[in-house]
Image (cartoon, rainbow, N blue to C red):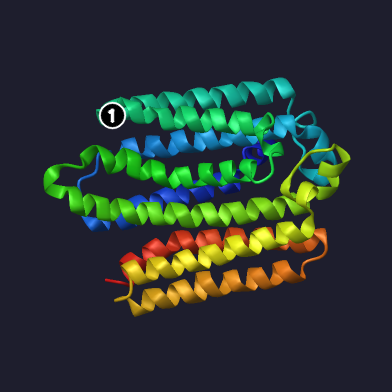
Amino acid sequence: MKYYLKLIRIENLLLIALMQLVIKYTFLNQADILQALSDWKYFLLIIATLSIAAGGYIINDIYDVDVDNINKPNKVYVGTHISEKNAYNLYFALNVIGVGLGFYLSRTVNKPAIAAVFVICSALLYVYSNGLKQIPLVGNAVIAFLAASSILVVGLFTIFPFIFDFNRNEMFSILSVIIDYAVLAFLLHFAREIIKTIEDIEGDKAFEITTVASYFGILVSKIITIFTLLGFIGYACYFIYNNIMHMPYVIGYFVILMILPTLFVIFKTITAKEKADFSLISKLIKIIMLTTIFSLTAIVLIGN
């Protein structure tokens, strides 16, 4: 069982679930607005999101077995602890669950067309694993967008169906915050994706896999990462100016737990030389993702 949990990146899935729970049970509930999904249907939305994400991790590992044997031999589960057939079966089952729940939930909110988001995400993850990842920057942007979509899907299924003339301004105000957090998530994930190409450059070059690092080189990859992280800082400042200028303690949270750590990561990126350095940077970005998620809780608990 533990190898199946590792295969689906359980720690990443828990981060996605935590993010969606924070959005729902701190931000949306505190806003006291109409929501299209009841608690148990929102739970199904989380399951659908996690199923598609887990399927994406599996199909990526199936296609990356050879290169992963060089880049991270201790983290190869397909063909060692789990057969390729079982991995494929789990991949198909998870996608059926994710897309099926998406169609069910879209019909319960009378917006059947929005189920397409799960179909699109599932298809993009397959196309990414099957070759799109070898288009420098494009593949990385796709993964970052898919990560951001796990935030956007909350607004799409809980807020969008209940936008009417009498509450349009209020609902769009809430939706704009969700979009802002999706942008922040996109920037962090994009930066981390670039760093991961530097981590994996040895195996990627051995198998002639085209990534940002193997194609442009480590220096250019560093520059892209730095500018992306500066973009994250800039957008965080934009969010502060537009939404929380009247909340000094929350501004302190953003500065101490999001902006300053990002500046530290930028410094580490400039000085990084060894694979272990880039591995550390990847972990630090993941921590900033976590503090960014909890900033919504800070807005609710500290700001009010």
Badge 1 amino acid: Lys
- Residue holding disc 1: 111
Residue 134 shows in this picture: yes
Left or right: where 187 falls relative to 204: left
Q: Quadrant of residue 93?
A: top right
The residue drawn where x is 49% and y is 67% is 234
- Residue 38 seen: no
The residue positioned 37% from the left and 63% from the top of the image is: 297
Q: Percent position (x, y) of residue 170?
A: 20, 54
Q: Position of residue 57 (x, y in %)?
A: 63, 37
Question: Label 1 crowding class (10 Å Cα cut-off): few <14, some 14-19, many 20+?
Answer: some
Q: Is residue 182 left or right of residue 304?
A: right
Quadrant that contains the N terminus: top right
Q: Is residue 22 left or right of residue 1?
A: left
Q: Position of residue 235 (x, y in %)?
A: 46, 64
Residue under the point 84% across and 39% down: 69
